[in-house]
Image (cartoon, coloured by chain):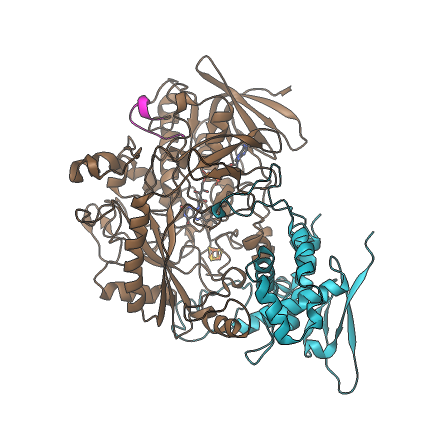
Chain colours: A brown, B cyan
Amino acid sequence: MKRLPEVDVVIVGGGWNGLLMAKELATRTSLSILVLERGGSHKPSEYVEGMDELDYGIRLKMMQDISEETVTFRHGPRDRSLPVRQYGSFLPGSGVGGSGEHWSGISYRYTPDAFELHSRTVEKYGANRLPEGHSIQDWGISYSELEPYYTRAEKMMGISGKAGNLHGKPVQGGNVFEGPRSEEYPTPPMKVPYLAALFRDATERLGYHPFPLPAATTSRAYKNPDGVSRAGCSYCGYCERFGCMIGAKAQPTNTVLPVLAHSRNFELRTGCRVRRTLRDAGHARGVTYVNAQGEEVVQPAGIVMLASWTLNNTRLLLLSGIDDAGKVGRNLTHHISIPAAMAFFEKPLNRFMGAGAAGIAINDFDADVFDHGKLDFIRGGSLYTVCYGFRPMANFGVTPASVKSTWGSEWKKASLHYYDRTGRISFYGEHLAYRDNYMDLDPTYKDRHGDPLLRLTLDWRDNERRMAAFMSRKAEQIAKEMGATEVTPFPGLKRYDATRYQSTHIQGGAIMGAKEGNSVVNNYLQHWQTPNLFVLGASAFPQNPSGNPTLTALALTYRTADAIIDRFIRNPGPLA
Amino acid sequence: MRRRHFLTLSATSLGGVLVYTLARKPIRVHAQDGQQTTLKLPLRFFTEAQALTVAAAAAQIFPSDDSGPGANEAGVVIYIDRQLAGPYGQDRFRYTSPPFAPGVPEQGYQGSESPAQLYREGLKQIRGLHLLGPSEQQATLTRIEHTPFFSLLRTHTIEGMFCDPMHGGNAGLIGWQLIGFPGPRMSYAGEIDKYYGREFRPEPLSLAQVLGRNAKPGEDAK
Ligand SMILES: Cc1cc2nc3c(=O)[nH]c(=O)nc-3n(C[C@H](O)[C@H](O)[C@H](O)COP(=O)(O)OP(=O)(O)OC[C@H]3O[C@@H](n4cnc5c(N)ncnc54)[C@H](O)[C@@H]3O)c2cc1C
Ligand code: SF4
């Protein structure tokens, strides 16, 4: 094996978290920073040529090459796991920028109570309201500790939105259920497409509190504190699953990489697939990887950071023999993400226009902002309408229940009529953690290099099913109030379905906590037993709150970067 | 080496619209009275008989009727032919390591057959479809309506109706015109919050028209 000279910091994965960490360390210290990314780099022109639904939206050109590596999946510990052979319920990215290149940019803060889920639920409703078999726990950090880092992450990306709670005072028109913010959003809300306007007006009439989705598809030209300028969004609709052709959507390549362009202490190596983290005597020593030429390489490093996304972080730890007595892999959560109601309208919606995060939401049924005393589930989520740009191959052929056929003349006629008259009210809900939802290494299936695949054991429980049913009823009412002539409610959450796209919000595996006994990393995402090993990203989330995860992951990355710069460099050791 | 196959179409079946050759050259074909103009399109995957069968099936799924043109005019069969000959048909986008074992539906398709193989097998069940009358064609397809092969045919027909024309379907942007989809456009910043409740229907443009040059479709990748 080829052995390279040591670097100060090696970061595995060049996505949002890896590159943000690299930017902070490379620009604020003289440490040598190396990012290893398994995929290739992107040319800006690629994203104009990439406005093609088939190759990008359907054949998923920007995602990880599934023929080389996938995960296996089963519902329960006694079931047989089989590989996820074609993409379905989530879409892991690959290449410089990671999934941050082709994300939608919805950028929520989590509610304060989400960070203290266990203690707040027990305090208010008693421990017997926690579902059977759960492994819910507090994060070991509070919202107010994270607030300044949320603000920094929002400024870095130029998030568009309207504050609903400034310094503890509710602000109408924003999300009045959010935690107190120290500042307004850096840019004003996105423009409101017609369907979202219908949703906004209907929910207002019903007495709810609609607000614009917080968006990294920035509403107008913006220069961030690092001096990086981006254009305002043009609502082209080739957004989710696509890189932005004008650089309006905050992506690692247009927001973070430009800052690193002239850093001499930063290197990004592409085509390098990391296979192991090296550790001995309680110290991380570096990583091994296979480079683009297929050579095995040892890269020694003073600090090792995994930023390869939830599933890869977990797998790399397990492949490296770091399982912390069974703690690594625990608390796998996804998102409840359902079309809570499909609504069919008389008027055309012009849905080809839009942006990944152009929409309106209500959080009147989020978290614990509504009383669960008499309900048969705990927690909640967000009901929303996002006009991300409706593309025909993925969406043609949806008809109301009154149309019985699925092909032929009658179906065609109805599908043509409804194509631009179909709206979706979506629901994103909290997914609680359970002992029997976890990750480990698959005993049978391997990747291209012969390493075992990660195995997901994952299913819904009654809490999720009941929450989904409750929210679909609310969505149906909203759809009717919006003027829909026919509404198809969600048929119900049954078993976890690895074939239906839900979201790429998968959490857990290397969870954070206040004490070593029940977590893998401390609240600086520092491995408890290996102080120079950090595990960044949503792998640290003990369970999944309702909102999209990236902003929270980036806030945690900022906090870790500060702690490394302010304390760890001088005094390497446990930060918490 | 595969013997070269062509799909021979009469211009009348194409109703005087734009079709694309495999070199992505658009040809405008007009039906002319009393004259049988025919068009020979080279096939990459199907034999001519298979192509005619698939075209007939696609035309039943998405017919040309009084609600507008359908799979025939859009060239759906050409789209499917290229997809099956390319990386998708050859299972480049799937994890294909054994062992293959049947699973529960939520684990997704677990078969070892590639899309190309599924078509080869599936086509045997509807051999000669194009030689049947319309109601017999419908009855034949109804019999296989719940098979994985039919669900592929249906998905691919929709894809071939609405793909960018560089992929062989949606000839003359006919699918996009049917639904008022304008294709890739740089900006709707001025329109996004206008046209509430009213149709906004910019003229469709293909990616090549927007770029001013051809882009490379995925099916042509090595
Ligand atoms: C279609 C889509 C829409 C989304 N929309 C939203 C949204 O609206 N809001 C939101 O908050 N989130 C959204 N997400 C999720 C968001 O993209 C992720 O949360 C975010 O990108 C995670 O950042 P990360 O740095 O942890 O991981 P990633 O961005 O996934 O980056 C990880 C990187 O590590 C690399 N890597 C992995 N393994 C290795 C290895 N062994 N060796 C070397 N490199 C490796 C990968 O190639 C990748 O580039 C969306 C995701 C997708 C796919
Ligand atoms: S919708 Fe806006 S942010 Fe998204 S890709 Fe288009 S221009 Fe970029």
Residue A309 shows in the view? no
Looking at the image, which residue is at 27% across and 46% down?
A: A183
**Quadrant of the image containing the N terminus of chain A:** top right
Residue sitting farthest toward the top: A281
- In percent of width and height, residue A168 lies at 19, 46
Residue A20 lies within the magenta run: no
Q: Residue at x 41, y 52 (%)?
A: A222
Q: Position of residue A359 (x, y in %)?
A: 37, 59
Position of A130 relative to B186 (above/below): above
Of the pair A23 and A62, the residue shown nearer to us: A62
What residue is drawn where x is 23% and y is 66%?
A: A205
* Residue appearing at x 23%, y 59% in the figure: A208
Main secondary-structure element of the magenta-colored stretch:
loop
Residue B56 in picture, x, y percent from top left? 66, 69
Q: Is A516 colored magenta in this rendering?
A: yes
- Is A351 rendered above or below residue A432? below
Is A444 situated left or right of A132 in this image?
A: right
Q: Compare residues A240 and A394 and report the one nearer the observer.
A: A394
Q: Position of residue A161 (x, y in %)?
A: 33, 54
Region in magenta: A510-519
| Quarter assignment of residue A135 | top left
